[in-house]
Image (spheres, grey):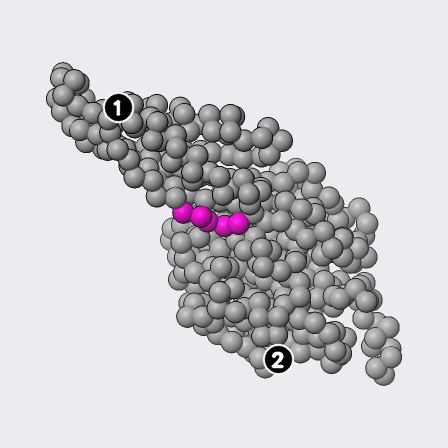
Amino acid sequence: MDKTDRLNNAFNFSSLLADAEILRPGLCEWRRHIHAFPELSGEEVETGKYVAQVLAKIGLTEIVSEYAQTAAVIATIQGDLPGPVVALRADLDALPILEGNDVPYVSQHPGVMHACGHDVHTSVLLGAAQLLWLRRSQIKGQVRLIFQPAEERSDCLGASHLIQAGVLANPPVEAIFGLHVYPDLPIGTMATRPGPMMASADVFQITLKGKGSHAARPHHSIDPILMAAQAVNALHQLVSRRVDPFQPAVLTIGFIQGGAAENVIPEAVTLGGTVRTLCPQLREQFPRWIEDLLQGVVGSHGGSFELNYQYGTAPVVNHPDTTAFAFQTLRQLLGFDQVRLLPEPSMGGEDFGAYLQAIPGTFLRLGVRSPEKAKIPGLHNPHFDIDEAALPVGAAALAALALAWPEN
Ligand code: NI
């Protein structure tokens, strides 16, 4: 094959899918290994080492392990043609869940499980690496492969940490793509949407401080239990009365702790919750709204409070241009009807949003449900598992995006 033929072949999507299908045994082997040895956020040392080993075995020569003092692995595939840098991202971490599946590749680490499909994302990106490595004569510019730790926990060193360390720089990345398994979609299909796709996910803790006393002498107390009851009620009214009804937002109180005996008014009560929005500006308002509200509630009792508000992941907002490109490319690869427009965003969070605050890009959903099954257990469920026929589809999809970028 001479160079012109190779160029003409660059967008031969059917060969890409067929090649990915040939790689299926390897994809399954990687996925099963990663699934069997899951590691929690911030502890993905062995998973990172395994990824680097597989990349080296495929033939890649530019591999950086333990990037930015984390388990991250960053690899580069330099194409033969001039062009920009495009990035593909996968996440490495598992969840603190005891696996309930009876499969040969069941988790060997009790209480830790790849219940969010990050084993799939990692093996799919390894598959894309292999497909791209074999086609490096057709790559315009270079492809940066980002295997990122700690997606599940915003207090660990995930996307934001890698971005601060320069993962999107030197030379700068022009566009980024990533995917997530999706149990509602059948194998062979993918889905995304332009604009907001997933929510920001912030968390907060509130300590309401009163004055303890005998339960029979409430007038000697400043009752933090009562303050908490009023605070919970009032906090839920922020979304219904402060937020524009056309802007999705969620405020959930997830825990409340205080008191130890029926006949004692305690000194303090703590509560914690999460705030989800699709709009960065709306997101910024919540800490002040919560603060103002607590001033009122606590002030009326003569108590005090401490608010600890932590910004977590940013909303996932897909760029219109990269999303139009992804629809066009993936529809050529998989068929027009196989690439669906998500009718609405989700209020779930995903730290891919941090990359999309920095550069254009698109996050996609990958169908992992067997067509024979009407429904499979959802993400974060101890019985979550995928049909491995999804692996070649995901690998080919990521490779196609990198090969086709930039459009002209
Ligand atoms: Ni996930």
Name the mark on residue 407: none
Residue under pointer 1: 301
Amino acid type, mark 2: Gly
Residue under pointer 2: 59
Question: Residue 287 versus residue 328: which sits nearer the camera?
Answer: 287
Quarter of the image with the N terminus in it: bottom right
Whether ligand 1 has any atom under 8 Å from the Cβ at mark 1 is answered as no
The residue positioned 66% from the left and 63% from the top of the image is 175
| Residue 28 position within the rendered picture, expressed as x and y whole percent measured from the top left | 60, 62
- Callout 2: helix, strand or loop? loop
Question: Residue 237 versus residue 393: which sits nearer the camera?
Answer: 237
Amino acid type, mark 1: His
| Residue 96 position within the rendered picture, expressed as x and y whole percent measured from the top left | 40, 50
Q: Which residues are magenta?
A: 310-314
Going from the N terminus, do you reach mark 1 or mark 2 first? 2
**Dot 1: within a 10 Å radius of its alpha carbon, few (fewer than 14), some, or many (20 or more) residues?**
some
Q: State yes or no: residue 139 in magenta.
A: no
